[in-house]
Image: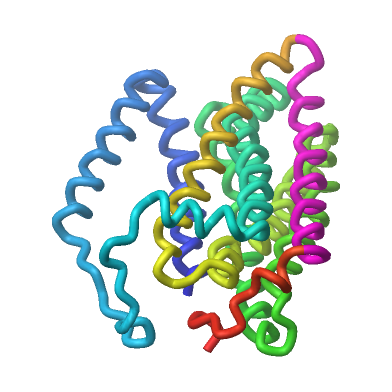
Amino acid sequence: ALSIHQTALYVGIISSGYIAGALAEILGWRHTFYLFGGFGILLGIILHFRMKDSINTQISNTSNEGITIKETLSAFFKKPTAILLSLAFAGMQFVGVGFLTWMPTFLHENFYFSLARAGFDSTFYHHVGAFVGVILGASVADKFVHKYHMMRVSIQATGLLLGAPFIYLMAKSSSILIIYISMLLFGIFRGMFDSNIFASLYQVIPVKYRAASTGFMLMFAFIIGSISPYLLGLYKPIFGLENGLASLSIIYIVASAIIFIAIAFTFSRDYLKQDVSDN
């Protein structure tokens, strides 16, 4: 269910990549940012009034009254696996945000694409692959997690490790066909990681702390990810954009290694054997 929900992100990014590029050619980037930001504010207002809490009968007896942020953070940091998963997710976001920010420029400068085409091509192939990967990874994880409780984190680590070579190939190839194929495969393996981001976290975090723990992990990952475009921008005039994008493959390998460390040393100890999501 989490993976099906995640596919909405891919659809939104693909469509916005083209629409933002087309609008930028007409209105300029500044006004395009204002427009997209304005829609975000409008959506936030709608969600505030329209979204309602649902009752999960499996956890209806779990009371969240009186839970403080300090208590939640204490529960989170007592789980080394949660910390390691957050670090790996931050590494994945560092790569993802850097890729989304600079890949349109890469295609525009190297292949002389229009801004609209560069925006679309830089997101379409990658996120179509991610769409396939997220459903595939989730299906395999849900099927085998009862037999092998580390299946979710294993799929995540494998996805990062297998995706790394295609990040490098995507950035270094001079063939647009190879770049498209690399983006597609990079996307498939990215989707495998995405398929269990929160499901893996929920295997080690008690139910009553999951919402706040999810928010904390997201906040940390996107703060780290926001640094990537700036660093790649500094890197670009010195070493070239293609080398900067290629270097992101190293981050994927490091993030994969972090999850393998969790598999080897912390996951079994932190694992909640009576995890509600797996019953």
> Residue at the left extreme?
49
Q: Residue at x 76, y 40 (%)?
A: 251
Q: Is residue 69 placed above or below 242 in the rendered structure?
A: below
Q: Is residue 208 placed above or below 176 in the rendered structure?
A: below
Instruction: Look at the magenta stretch and give its main secondary structure.
Output: helix
Examine the rendering and report whether any part of residue 98 can be seen.
yes
Residue nearer the viewer, 203 or 9 = 203
Total marks placed: 0
Is 54 part of what is drawn in magenta? no
Q: Give how far across and how far down residue 160 sits, in percent.
A: 75, 54
Q: Residue at x 25, y 34 (%)?
A: 38
Residue nearer the viewer, 252 or 88 = 88
Left or right of residue 163, residue 55 in this image: left
Q: Residue at x 52, y 39 (%)?
A: 222
Left or right of residue 243, residue 205 in this image: left
Left or right of residue 20, residue 196 in this image: right
Q: Give how far across and how far down residue 181 sits, in percent.
A: 76, 51
Q: Give how far across and how far down residue 100 sits, in percent.
A: 59, 37
Residue nearer the viewer, 63 or 234 = 63
Q: Quadrant of residue 136?
A: bottom right
Q: Which residues are magenta?
A: 238-265
Is 261 part of what is drawn in magenta? yes
> Residue at the top extreme?
237
Examine the rendering and report whether any part of residue 125 can be seen.
no
